[in-house]
Each structure stands twice: as structure tokens, then as C-alpha cells.
Image (cartoon, helix red, strand yellow):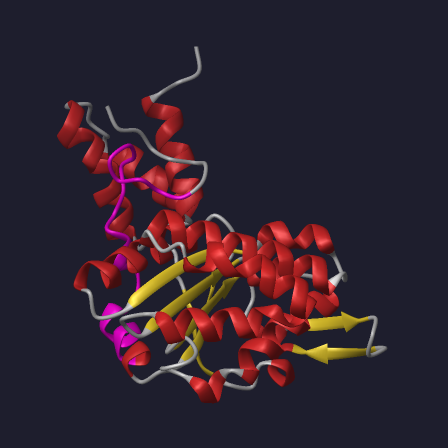
């Protein structure tokens, strides 16, 4: 039996869920990708950003027009301002995800040699070589981008910016940066440059900034009533109104309240 999810991305086989692709303007995003744009998706934590990106990756790959890869760079936060170490984490994540999600072992075979030769500058070359050998235009989703710190974040943003003119043949056609904040709001404390750098100046190729919203009242009811349809357990009108009043559609809170009343703690 499915349940209301409060931890990690939604899996619609296990969890009650709304179609993640219905939570944003899919046609608008597809147009940005077709126009070779780099853009930002942001929203507070526990809103469903990762679930939406994973669903969008599957949608794009299933249609075989693009070769899309999702990566999460949060592990590189541990490197703090050690740029070389941070890039090593990111390259390893790219290689692992490409192998598991695309059955593509190209990055797995080259990333460490690139890292040994280029150190913290290896990201640009890895993206160049990976895109060049791809049979389709490549698309990259970078999740938790604003978890990176200082010089590591600046290095990632600038290496992506440096490859922008090589797209789509030798660099990703489109890149989505995803995080809690819009890149323009980043105030990055760079130890090497001894200055505060704004995200807008480090990544001035951004075309759009999209914010993922909360559920509407209609969507909140729709999610809750999936449980009724599958189990026969009804939500009273007062219960439906109470969940909306207390959550205002914040996705994690909607799921948490619904989980409490459908799977009460013994």
C-alpha cells in the first residue's frame, strides 16, 4: 500500500503523489531547453524540486531527443573552499550517475585521469568530452548547487560559463541549476579573491529563474483523495479543510499531516 512521503524524492510506485511534471510549466521548460538556455529552478527545501528534476530527466530521455543527466553536488560541500577536492566529488558523482541512469561508462573511464591532469579545472573538460561523444545533445541538471561553498561554488559556476559558447556540440545544450535560492542572490565569500562575489556576476549566462510553487488547494485535496480512492478511508470535509488551513499547500507539511492521520503512531 502506498503512503504519504516525508523523506526524500517522491516515488509514485511507493508514495501518493501528483505528477511532478504538472507542477511546473513543462512546455516553457522544453522551450528553454530547445533554445539552448541555461537557467535556474529554486524553491525552499522539501518542496519537491528533486522529484521534479528526476521526472523531467526521465521524460527527456524517454523521448530520445536529448541525453539528460541529473547530478546532486551536495557531497562536495564537505570540501568547503578546497576547489580541487570539491571538483573531485562532482566528477565522481557525474560518472556514477551517468553509469547508473544512462548506462554510459564514458565519464567513469576518463574522469580520474582528467582530475589528475587538471585538478580543480577538470569539470569544464569533462563536460566538453562527455558532450562531444554523446549521440544526442546533452542536458545537465545540477541539484543542490547552493550547498557548495566559496571558491568551490565560484569555480563550478565559472567553468560552466566558460564552456557556454561550445554548446551544443561540445558542451551541454542546456543546464538547470537547482537550489534553495536564485543564483542572483548568492553572495559568495571567496578566500582566494578576498572579496564577496555575487552569483549574478559569476554566472551571467542565466536566461530565466523559475520558482517551484506549493500545492494549490485543489492539488492538496487531489493528493489526499488518492488515499481514499485506494483504501476507502475517507477524509471528512473538515479534515480536508484543516490540512489546507494548516499547511497552505507546503508539500512536505501536506504529506506529514496526511501521514499522521492515515498511519498514526502506535
Nearest the viewer among 147 and 116 is: 116
The segment highlighted magenta reads 9-31
Give the side of residue 134 with respect to residue 117, left or right. left
Q: Quadrant of residue 125?
A: bottom right
Foreground of the two, 46 or 105: 105
Residue 38 lies in the magenta-colored region: no
Q: Quadrant of residue 227?
A: top left
Residue 7's image quarter?
A: top left
Q: Tell me: residue 70, above or below residue 7.
A: below
Q: Please name the residue shown 72% across and 71% down the image.
A: 188
Location of the C terminus (image quadrant): top left
Left or right of 93, for residue 12: left
Percent x, y for residue 213?
Answer: 39, 61
In the rendered image, which quarter contains the N terminus?
top left
Q: Residue furthest top?
A: 266
* Residue 91, placed above or below residue 126: above
Q: Vertical placement of 34 versus 243: above or below?
A: below
Residue 164 in the image, given as x and y percentages of width and height? 48, 84
- Whether residue 26 is in magenta: the answer is yes
Residue at x 37% of width, y 35% of height: 5
Amino acid at each position: 500500500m502506498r503512503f504519504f512521503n516525508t523523506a526524500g524524492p517522491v516515488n509514485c510506485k511507493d508514495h501518493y503523489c501528483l505528477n511532478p511534471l504538472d507542477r511546473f510549466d513543462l512546455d516553457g521548460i522544453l522551450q528553454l531547453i530547445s533554445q539552448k538556455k541555461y537557467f535556474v529552478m529554486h524553491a525552499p527545501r522539501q518542496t519537491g524540486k528533486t522529484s521534479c528534476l528526476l521526472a523531467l530527466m526521465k521524460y527527456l530521455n524517454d523521448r530520445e531527443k536529448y541525453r539528460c543527466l541529473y547530478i546532486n553536488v551536495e557531497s562536495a560541500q564537505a570540501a568547503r573552499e578546497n576547489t580541487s577536492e570539491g571538483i573531485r566529488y562532482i566528477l565522481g558523482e557525474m560518472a556514477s550517475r551517468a553509469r547508473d541512469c544512462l548506462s554510459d561508462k564514458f565519464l567513469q573511464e576518463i574522469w580520474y585521469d582528467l582530475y589528475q591532469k587538471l585538478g580543480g579545472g577538470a569539470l569544464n573538460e569533462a563536460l566538453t568530452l562527455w558532450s562531444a561523444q554523446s549521440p544526442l545533445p546533452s542536458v545537465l541538471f545540477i541539484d543542490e548547487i547552493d550547498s557548495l561553498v566559496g571558491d568551490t561554488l565560484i569555480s563550478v559556476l565559472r567553468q560552466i560559463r566558460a564552456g557556454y559558447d561550445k554548446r551544443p556540440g561540445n558542451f551541454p545544450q542546456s543546464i538547470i541549476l537547482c537550489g534553495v535560492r536564485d543564483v542572483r542572490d548568492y553572495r559568495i565569500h571567496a578566500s582566494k579573491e578576498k572579496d564577496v562575489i555575487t552569483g549574478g556576476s559569476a554566472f551571467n549566462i542565466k536566461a530565466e529563474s523559475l520558482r517551484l510553487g506549493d500545492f494549490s488547494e485543489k492539488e492538496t485535496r487531489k493528493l489526499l483523495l488518492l488515499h481514499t480512492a485506494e483504501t476507502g478511508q475517507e477524509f471528512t470535509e473538515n479534515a480536508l479543510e484543516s490540512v489546507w488551513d494548516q499547511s497552505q499547500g507546503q508539500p512536505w507539511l501536506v504529506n506529514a499531516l496526511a501521514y499522521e492521520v492515515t498511519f498514526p503512531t502506535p
